[in-house]
């Protein structure tokens, strides 16, 4: 099952490569394609998140939070009842994230398999390729070079006057992940529980970019290129849906948090 | 909101763990490379080079003393002038003392892996590298010349003492002057070459990933004939008394007339795909299949025996001193030795 899934990824990726003749461009186009295919899920995720935000402003929600603050079981029951009544699924915004996981892992494996750098890896790759769809003999060897990068290896930009390589892609991935997570975060608001959520959200805004940056630094640059393309396309996608919070990039948030902490 | 953030955080950590575990494949892997010299087998596998007694499979020495996890060896070691010469996957060519495995010299200013073993002609070491170059070294490890191709070189070069012949992943076969490194000719083969070529008299025989075996005139590089196989031809064909023996990934074994390129006989559906060359015994040939079978056939295409091994067989078997030595992937040993009836004599697993 998983092998068949990877096989689809590899063949689509190689087909794009066959058309454009550049593996870096093929990864970017493939990312765009994946984003287009998963666009309905993204819309669903946004709707779910938006409904959850609206719910937290709902009078009944606030009332039951206050009423059952010492009875967690009852609180959960009441919350579920309210979800049901308003037709909200608390997991509707998580499902698209879950679906993205096998896609990211599948893409990673497709990139690694396609950039076969040893005979046994190449042999495995040829077993994935659909012979009727792609001409393996003509495709191999794949050109794994894109700009200054070897996409099968972690990226470093080596400059003659520096004794070490600069991980440009890892830095750019970290920055774009930070920008993306800040711009996609909901606007901060006051309130006890929301302060906690805002704190966790701001922690996420720091940890996630660092995590993605570390992955981009340590894994094949083909995957880092996917992260970067995915971030940029994601920002564009949210912008087109009118869901970007440009204000989050400005240092207003500190004021709000500061005000909240005075209360 | 809080639960969603926690959920995303947990999932991100799982993703990180999964991707990091996937990155295990970033450590290069391949099949064992080995060759026989006198009473020893020299094996390259994972993080070391091993000298093994041919008679009993006992370890004689290993290199390096302290393994580096990033430095992997899969190219077949080659013995010449009292040295064991072997390239690694961290862009370094090593020369080791034949008797004890101590390092004699290294050459590490290459920008690519050494996938195949070197060829030694007189006092010249020919080493193909995946940085798109063929290197010629003297026996002290000094570069005499290097020759650039259009893509990585995985195949083992060959030489007749006048020219060096290199089939490349770039679909071309090159002839290079052995003394100067100047190009003599190049020919488009129509497909990438992984294994190498068979050199005999005026002909070069080479298989490609475009499912063909070609005969090329070594004077000018003209293709004399080409034969369409059922699958990709990864390994070097074996020539004996005017007949070429080889197999392909469609699991077909062929015997071709070397002069005309016509089929003498063929055996289909031998087992799994075959990427290794045949080992030549006294009365026949032995082929390795991916599904772990050693298949012995005589020179007329009649099956002699089959031996099922625990593991996958990609490496080409070597026949020496009445023994068939074969490398094994994903099995309980890295090397196994059999007699000509397929009975196991010994096996060698990496020391822990």
Image (cartoon, helix red, strand yellow):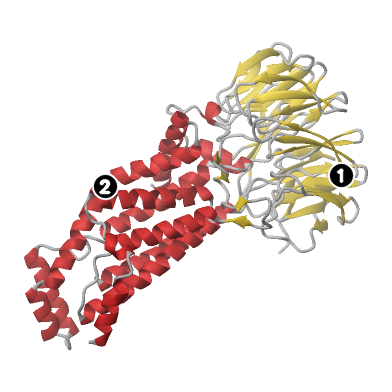
Of the pair B26 and B320, the residue shown nearer to us: B26
In the current view of this chain or complex, which residue is farthest to the bottom? A70
Q: Image quarter for residue B149?
A: top right
> Quick check: can you spot residue B75?
yes
Label 1 residue SS: loop
Q: Is residue A86 left or right of residue A182?
A: left
Label 1 resides on the chain identified as B
Q: In whole angstroms, how far apart are the C-alphas of marks 1 and 2?
A: 57 Å
Q: Residue at x 82, y 28 (%)?
A: B181
Q: Is residue B317 left or right of residue A124?
A: right
Q: Chain of mark 2?
A: A
Mark 2 is surrounded, within 10 Å at the Cα level, by few (under 14), some (14 to 19) or many (20 or more) other residues, namely some
Compared to A118, does B150 lie above or below? Answer: above
Which of the numbered marks, if any, corresponds to residue B141?
1
Residue A98 % position (x, y): 32, 58
**Viewer-proximal residue among A60 and B156:** A60
Residue A48: assigned label: none
SS at mark 2?
A: helix
Left or right: B130 as drawn, with respect to A230: right
Tell me the residue that label 2 is attached to. A39
Count of number-bearing discs: 2
- Please name the residue shown 63% across and 35% down the image: B275
The quadrant holding residue B192 is top right
């Amino acid at each position: 099952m998983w092998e068949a899934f990877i096989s689809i990824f590899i063949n689509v990726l190689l087909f794009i490569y066959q058309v454009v003749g550049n593996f870096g461009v093929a990864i970017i186009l493939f990312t765009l394609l994946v984003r287009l295919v998963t666009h309905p899920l993204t819309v669903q995720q946004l709707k779910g998140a938006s409904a959850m935000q609206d719910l937290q402003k709902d009078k009944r929600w606030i009332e039951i939070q206050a009423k059952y603050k010492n009875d967690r079981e009852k609180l959960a029951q009441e919350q579920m009842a309210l979800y049901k009544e308003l037709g909200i699924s608390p997991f509707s915004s998580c499902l698209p994230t879950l679906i993205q996981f096998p896609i990211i892992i599948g893409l990673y494996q497709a990139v690694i398999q396609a950039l076969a750098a040893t005979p046994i890896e190449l042999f495995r790759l040829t077993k994935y390729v659909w012979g009727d769809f792609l001409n393996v003999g003509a495709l191999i060897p794949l050109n794994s070079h894109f700009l200054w990068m070897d996409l099968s290896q972690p990226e470093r930009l080596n400059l003659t006057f520096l004794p070490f390589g600069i991980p440009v892609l890892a830095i750019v991935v970290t920055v774009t992940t930070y920008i993306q997570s800040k711009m996609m975060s909901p606007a901060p608001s006051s309130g006890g529980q929301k302060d906690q959520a805002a704190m966790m959200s701001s922690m996420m805004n720091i940890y996630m970019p660092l995590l993605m940056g570390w992955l981009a630094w340590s894994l094949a640059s083909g995957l880092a290129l996917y992260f970067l393309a995915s971030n940029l396309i994601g920002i564009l996608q949210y912008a087109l849906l009118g869901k970007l919070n440009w204000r989050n990039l400005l240092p207003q948030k500190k004021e709000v948090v500061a005000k909240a902490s005075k209360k | 909101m809080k639960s969603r953030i926690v959920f995303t955080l947990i999932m991100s950590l799982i993703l990180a763990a999964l991707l990091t575990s996937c990155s295990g494949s970033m450590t290069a892997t391949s099949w064992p490379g080995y060759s026989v010299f006198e009473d020893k087998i020299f094996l390259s596998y994972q993080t070391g080079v091993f000298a093994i007694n041919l008679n009993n499979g006992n370890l004689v020495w290993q290199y390096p003393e302290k393994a580096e996890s990033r430095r992997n060896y899969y190219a077949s070691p080659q013995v010449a002038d009292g040295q064991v010469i072997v390239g690694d996957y961290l862009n370094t060519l090593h020369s080791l003392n034949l008797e004890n495995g101590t390092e004699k010299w290294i050459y590490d200013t290459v920008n690519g892996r050494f996938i195949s073993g070197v060829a030694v002609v007189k006092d010249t070491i020919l080493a193909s590298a995946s940085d798109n170059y063929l290197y010629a070294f003297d026996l002290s490890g000094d570069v005499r010349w290097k020759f650039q191709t259009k893509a990585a070189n995985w195949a083992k070069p060959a030489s007749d003492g006048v020219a060096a012949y290199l089939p490349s992943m770039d679909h071309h076969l090159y002839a290079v002057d052995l003394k100067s490194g100047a190009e003599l000719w190049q020919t488009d083969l129509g497909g990438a070459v992984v294994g190498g070529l068979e050199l005999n008299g005026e002909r070069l025989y080479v298989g490609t990933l475009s499912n063909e075996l070609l005969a090329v005139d070594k004077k000018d590089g003209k293709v004399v004939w080409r034969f369409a196989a059922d699958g990709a031809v990864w390994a070097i064909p074996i020539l004996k008394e005017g007949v070429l023996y080889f197999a392909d990934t469609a699991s077909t074994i062929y015997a071709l007339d070397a002069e005309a390129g016509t089929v003498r006989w063929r055996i289909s559906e031998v087992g799994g795909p075959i990427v290794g060359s045949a080992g030549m015994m006294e009365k026949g040939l032995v082929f390795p299949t991916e599904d772990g079978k050693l298949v012995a056939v005589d020179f007329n295409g009649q099956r002699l025996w089959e031996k099922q091994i625990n593991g996958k067989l990609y490496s080409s078997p070597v026949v020496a001193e009445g023994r068939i030595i074969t490398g094994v992937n994903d099995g309980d040993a890295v090397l196994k030795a059999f007699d000509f009836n397929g009975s196991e004599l010994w096996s060698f697993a990496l020391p822990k």
